[in-house]
Image (cartoon, grey):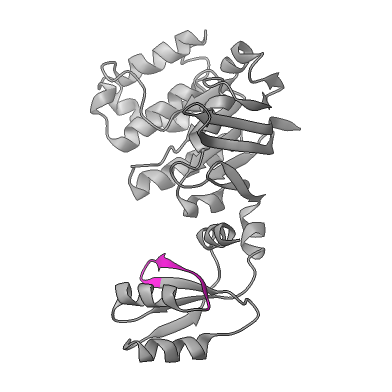
Amino acid sequence: MVAVQLNNLSKKYDKGKIVAVDSISFSVDKGELFGLIGPDGAGKTSIFRMLTTLLLPDGGSAVVDGYDAVKDYKAIRGRVGYMPGKFSLYQDLTVEENLNFFATVFGTTIRENYELVKDIYVQIEPFKTRRAGKLSGGMKQKLALCCALIHKPSVLFLDEPTTGVDAVSRKEFWEMLKRLKQQGITILVSTPYMDEATICDRIALIQSGKILSIDTPDAIVRSYEGSLFAIKSEGMYKLLNDLRSYENTLSCFAFGEYHHIAFRDKMKNYSEELLKYLENKGHKEVEMMPVIPTIEDCFIKLLKN
């Protein structure tokens, strides 16, 4: 059963000069953990704001939990949870006061839905009398998620929830999402972090308001055509420039301690020719090896197509 359906959804800004969302269509099944993956400015936030009835679309339509995103906005607001990218709770209220406030707005209580937020709330309960503005980034994140869940939404929208938090908090947050998914909640999460894509059931890769690919993370990686190589040398900055200047390079970008390079002709092995080219450019101690593509590699490859 479908929980969210987008049909040619569009959004423009600056009197139509800027196309933020360009006729996007996709669906999300009930109980699915769906990731919208792309860099800043790709259109992720605009999509979420339209689906949560905070923005009116300029074209197309969307249905959330069976309700039209424009005509039935009141019904949708009572059925979804939304955690915006920027911390937007009341900074001067305490943890407990914020949670009580949001529960009251939706006509419920913390006690009524405590089991839903228990695993998360117990981590911030020791700080329940602390003002929200004084919490750490990870604690703010947990409080915001509790407030988004306190009315037991059927669909949860999380807009870049792990941006700006430490690696441990990021990992904890995704563990929490896995547990929420087990309770039957449909979760849509947006993130610029490609490594988080692998945790989702399905993902949509998005850039400049357009969907590049929609599938399971494994299927997207398997669809990568051609060979990919990791390469490094003593002078990594010069290496990157020289690799990009090489006539047979399709794409090359920094990836940890290596550069990842893909070639224009996916059927041809340029390894020997490339090593000779780099030797002539003065590079020493060059290491080169084939690697398995990641979601990030697939994203960059799709941009080049």
Front residue (pair 124, 227): 227
Q: Which residues are magenta?
A: 248-258
Q: Toward the viewer: 120 or 196?
A: 196
Above/below status of 136 relative to 56: below
Residue at x 34%, y 81% (from the top left corner): 233
On the image, the x and y values in percent for residue 162 come to 41, 41
Would residue 88 be visible to someone looking at this image? Answer: yes
- Locate residue 181 relative to residue 233 in the image: left or right: right
Where is residue 5? Give x, y as percent.
69, 31
Q: Residue furthest right?
A: 1
Q: Is 249 in the magenta?
A: yes
Q: Is residue 40 above or below residue 228?
A: above
Using residue 62 as the reference point, say whether residue 259 is left or right of it. left
Assign the N terminus to one quadrant of the image.
top right
At which x and y percent is residue 277?
A: 43, 88
Instruction: Judge whether residue 203 can be spotted in this image.
Output: no
**Residue at coordinates 48% horizontally, 15% vertically from top-left?**
111
Is residue 216 left or right of 156 when viewed as pictured? Answer: right
The residue sitting at 59% across, 44% down in the picture is: 210
Residue 122 sits in quarter: top left
The answer to which quarter of the image holds residue 12 is top right
